[in-house]
Amino acid sequence: MDKMNKDDKAILRSAQAPSQESWDRLLRFLRQRYGGAVELVWFEDPSLQDGFLLTVGTDVYDWSLEGRLRQFKNRMDQVRPARGGVIPLIKEAVENWVPQATPEEVGTVVAVGDEIATVTGLKNASYGEILLFPSGVKGMVQELRRDEIGCMLFGDGDEIVEGSIVHRSGKTAGIPVGDDFLGRVINALGEPIDGKGEITSTEYRPIEAAAPSIIDRQPVNTPMETGLLAIDTMFPIGRGQRELIIGDRQTGKTAIALDTILNQKGKGVICIYVAIGQKASSVAELVQNLAKRGAMDYSIVVSASASDTATMQYIAPYAGCALGEYFMNRGKDVLIVYDDLTKHAIAYRALSLLLERSPGREAYPGDVFYLHSRLLERSAHLSEEKGGGSMTALPIVETQAGDVSAYIPTNIISITDGQIFLESELFFSGQRPAVNVGLSVSRVGGDAQTKAMKTAAGAIRLDLAQFREMEVFTQFSSDLDDLTRQQLSYGQGLMRLLRQPQYHPMQQHEQVFLLVAALHHLLQDLPLGRIDDFRREYLEYMEVHGAALARKIDQTGQMTQEDQEAILDLAEKFLQDFTQEAR
C-alpha cells in the first residue's frame, strides 16, 4: 500500500462528470491503494472524450485513449522475434493484452530551447533514460538536480512548450542492432538514411555499456593490417587496440582510416565508420568510394552530420560502438573509426553549457575526459570464453597548428594505445601518408606483427630517425663526405618508398618484398624519380616469380632466412634488368 502526503489530493479529469457508481468505485480503489480518507476532486477536461486522467500526488493513472495506446505500444515493443517468427507472438500479445490501471510518473516541461528541455515532476527518472514528449519527440535525461532534470532532445522540439506533459519510457537510450545493418547508412538513432528501406533488427542494445573487465580480455596479438607500408612496418595495429590518428586539418587522417577499411576486404572484419559533424556531401562521397570498391558489403556508416543537432552528434559514437559490440560479442572482429572526436567534444561542450554545467578548461565540462574514456575502453580483444571477438578503434582528432598538447588531444592520447601523428609539412611536400616517425608510436608494437613482417621491417624506424636528424644538420652544408651522402641517399629512398597513393593498400607479402629489398640497400643508387616505377614493376615481377613465397607469407606469417635470401636474389635480378632498361 502506498502512502499519501496529507496535502495530496486525488484529482480526476474527464470530459463528463462521473456517475455515482463510477465515483464510488474510484474511491474504493483509492482507499485500497493509498489507505485512509482520500479526498477526490473532479475537473472538467473536454480533451479527454474517451477516458479519464487520475492524478494522486506524483502518480498518474492515464486511462485516456492516448494512454491506453501507449500501454499497447509498450507491450508490442517487448515482442522479440523467435524461431517460430514474430507473427504468432504479436497475435498472442494482442489477444491477451488488457489495459492495466498502474500509476505512471508524469512530468511537466518548465523551460525548453536550444535542444534542451527542463522538466519537473519526474523524481524517479534515471540518468540516460529516454523521455517521451508531445508529437513523438524523444529526449534523454542528462542532468539530475534536486527538483528538476535537464533533458537533451533528439528531434525537432518546436511543438514542445512550457507546460507540455512528459512521460517516462523506463528505457535507457539504445539502438536497434542486427546483421541487416551491414551495407547501410544510418543516423545516430539507428534509422536508415540511405533510401534503401527499413532495416530489420534482432536486438536492442543500450548505447552506453560497461567496458569488458580485465579477466574478459586477452592480449592484443593479432595484426589489424592497414595496408599502409609506413604504418604496418613501424606502428603496427593489433585487433582490440585503440590507435589515435591525429593531425591538422587536411593532412590525410580520414584517408588512412578509409584505406584501412578497404584493406579488410575478404578478411572477415566488419567495419563501422562514424562521421561526427561532417558535411553530408563529404559522407556521401565516402560512402560512394566504399561502395565503388566493394567495401560497403562489410561496412556500416553512422552519420551525424553538421546539420544534425548537437544531441545526435553526441550519441553517434556510442551508437556505433553499440553496433560494434553486437558483432564483437558474436566472436567477430570489428574495426570502428570515430571521425572525429574533436567535433564530438565540441558538441558535448555546447550541450553541457546549455545544461548550465560549470565550465572548466577551454569551457569544457569537468567530465570531458570520462566522455571519451568510457567510449574507447569498450574496444577490446575478448577472451576465448567470451567468444574471442575483437573491436579495434581508430579515433581521429584534429589539432591546431600541430599542437598535440591541447586539452582534447592530450586527453585522448592518454586513453589510447598509441598515436599516428600526421604532419602538415610532410603532407604538402608530397610525403603521403604524412606520418611523423618521431611523434608516432604504437604501444603494442611488435606483438601485433607477424614474424615475417617483424623480420622484414628490421631497423627501418631507427634508420629513418637517423636520416631525419642527419638531414637537419646537413641541409646548410654543401661539402659532404661519401658516407654521409650514401646515408642521405638511402634515407631519401626509404622515404620515397613509403609514399603510397590513396585507395591502394598493400598485401602483407607485397610489403615484405619491398622491405627486404629496401633495407638491404638495393635501392640506394636508384634516382628518386625512378623509385615509384621500381615499386610497381618489382611487385608485378614478384607476383609471377615469387608466387610461392607470397602464398607462404600470407598464409603462415612466417619468413625463414632461406626465404629472405630467395627474395633478395629475385630482387637483385629484377634490379639488374630494371637499371639496364633505364640505360
Image (spheres, grey):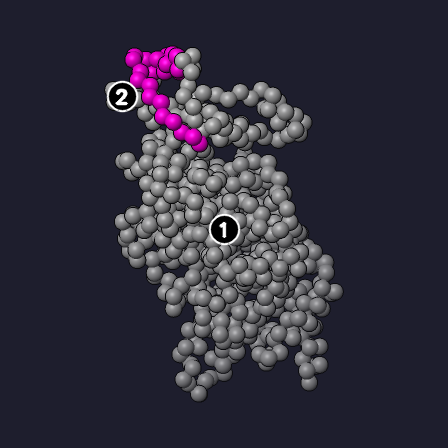
Q: Left or right? Give the position of 448 relative to 152.
A: right
Assign the N terminus to one quadrant of the image: top left
Residue drawn at x 41%, y 77% is 472
Task: Using the image as rendered, state which of residue 155 and residue 515 is in the foreground.
Answer: 155
Question: Residue 378 placed where, x, y %?
Answer: 46, 43
Res 5 label: 2
Task: Using the image as rendered, state which of residue 415 and residue 236 is in the foreground.
Answer: 415
**Badge 2 element:** loop
Question: Residue 26 placed where, x, y %?
Answer: 40, 16
362 magenta-colored = no
The magenta segment? 23-47
Is the Cβ of the residue at disc 1 closer than 8 Å to that at disc 2? Answer: no
- State which mark lies toward you, 1 or 2: 2
Q: What residue type is labelled 1?
A: Ala
Decide: few, some or many residues near mark 1? Use Cα within 10 Å; few <14, some 14-19, many ≥20.
Answer: many
Q: What residue type is labelled 2?
A: Asn
Residue drawn at x 61%, y 49% is 184
Q: Name the residue under label 1.
A: 393
Residue 475 is at least partly visible in this image: yes
The quarter of the displayed image where residue 123 is located? top left
**Badge 1 element:** strand
36 magenta-colored = yes
Task: Using the image as rendered, state which of residue 164 and residue 513 is in the foreground.
Answer: 164
Q: Is residue 161 above or below residue 232?
A: above
Task: Using the image as rendered, state which of residue 154 and residue 212 is in the foreground.
Answer: 154
Q: Is residue 60 above or below residue 491?
A: above
The quarter of the displayed image where residue 423 is located? bottom left
